[in-house]
Amino acid sequence: MEFLWDDCIYITYKTNEPKPARRGSHSMSISYSDRFREKDAVEFYDSNEYGSGSYSTAIWQLQRPVLEQILKDFRRERTEPIRLLDFACGTGRVLASLEPLLDSAEGIDISENMVAVARTKCVKARLLVGDILASPELLQKKYDIISCFRFLLNVEPEMRSRVLRRLREVLRTPDGRLLVNVHGNSRSLRHPAIVWRRQREREEKSGEMLNEMSPAGTKKLLRETGFEVVRQFGFGILPPTLYRTPLRKAALVVDWSLAGDHWWNDCSIDMLFVCRPC
Ligand SMILES: C[S@@+](CC[C@H](N)C(=O)[O-])C[C@H]1O[C@@H](n2cnc3c(N)ncnc32)[C@H](O)[C@@H]1O
């Protein structure tokens, strides 16, 4: 089943993230909110998706120092305490890296099992389990920074707007910042491989998810939900396939030298947007 949403193709049964324990009809109907509830999906995310040597880990190594620098710059410009919310914090990958740089940090996720792992990684962040749409009272404070990683791309399209609007309500105006990424750019060099894999998936129905969003489509979504992009960073220009060949080290060097805030960001596989409320 496919939806065409702006210039993003959303396929309900394909993921480049943990596959559900059972495939087939189960994988075709599972919602994104349920995808990470089972322990084996959590285990897959931490050990495989972010296992040592994975492509996602390589991209995170490029992204992490940039994120930390954004927070340090933000801190330099302010004297008041800084409060961060990491929405869909998962196993705490982003939160554990950022919490030392902040006065207070909170993480929220719908999956108890993901948060259980986050609790083992985060030292000072307050961690909550819940659905911010069904229980809006879960977020009552205003946050100076809200991070949202690896959520937008694969969540159902109508959920993207609803979640972003709720996050907008709790982001401090006018100085707050939303840091949001999209880890599958339809304008990147990976796109042809994704098209081919979608084709193959139509027959195999293996339960993979191969969604993509374009830079323009993402910015439009952000604008419509109350955000203006003030900076854009990009990570990963080369096709990830290269990372599974003897050229891996060379690919890492090239992607490292091309990562950051450049005019070719619209071609990066992983896009990071720094947004202010508008
Ligand atoms: C791919 S993981 C990303 C985790 C983390 N942000 C990271 O980048 O490593 C997506 C996360 O979104 C969470 N999620 C899915 N739907 C959600 C919802 N409606 N509210 C909160 N979290 C949700 C999942 O439980 C999962 O932990």
Image: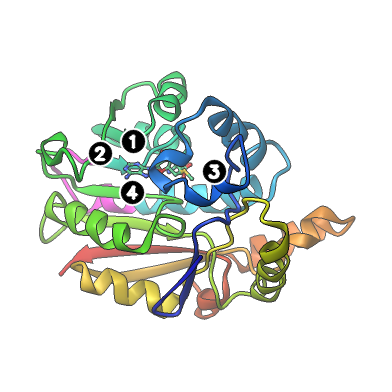
- Point 40% across, 21% down: residue: 119
| Residue 53 relative to residue 39: left or right | right
Above or below, comparing residue 196 to residue 139 in the picture: below
Q: Secondary structure at mark 1?
A: loop
- The residue at which mark 3 appears reads as 26
Query: Residue at point 16% right, 38% down?
Result: 135
Whether residue 147 is visible, yes or no, is yes
Q: Indicate yes or no: mark 1 CB to ligand 1 under 8 Å.
A: yes
Q: Is the distance from the Cβ of mark 2 to the nearest ligand 1 atom less than 8 Å?
A: yes
What residue did someone put label 4 on?
Answer: 147
Please tell me whether mark 4 sits on a helix, a strand or a loop. Answer: strand
Q: Where is residue 124 drawn, in percent x and y?
A: 32, 23
- The residue range painted magenta reads 72-84
Tag nearer the camera, 4 or 2: 2
Magenta segment: does it hold 10?
Answer: no
Amino acid type of the residue that numbered disc 3 sits on in the rendered structure: His
Q: Residues within 10 Å of mark 1 (few under 14, many from 20)?
A: many
Left or right: 16 in relation to 242: left
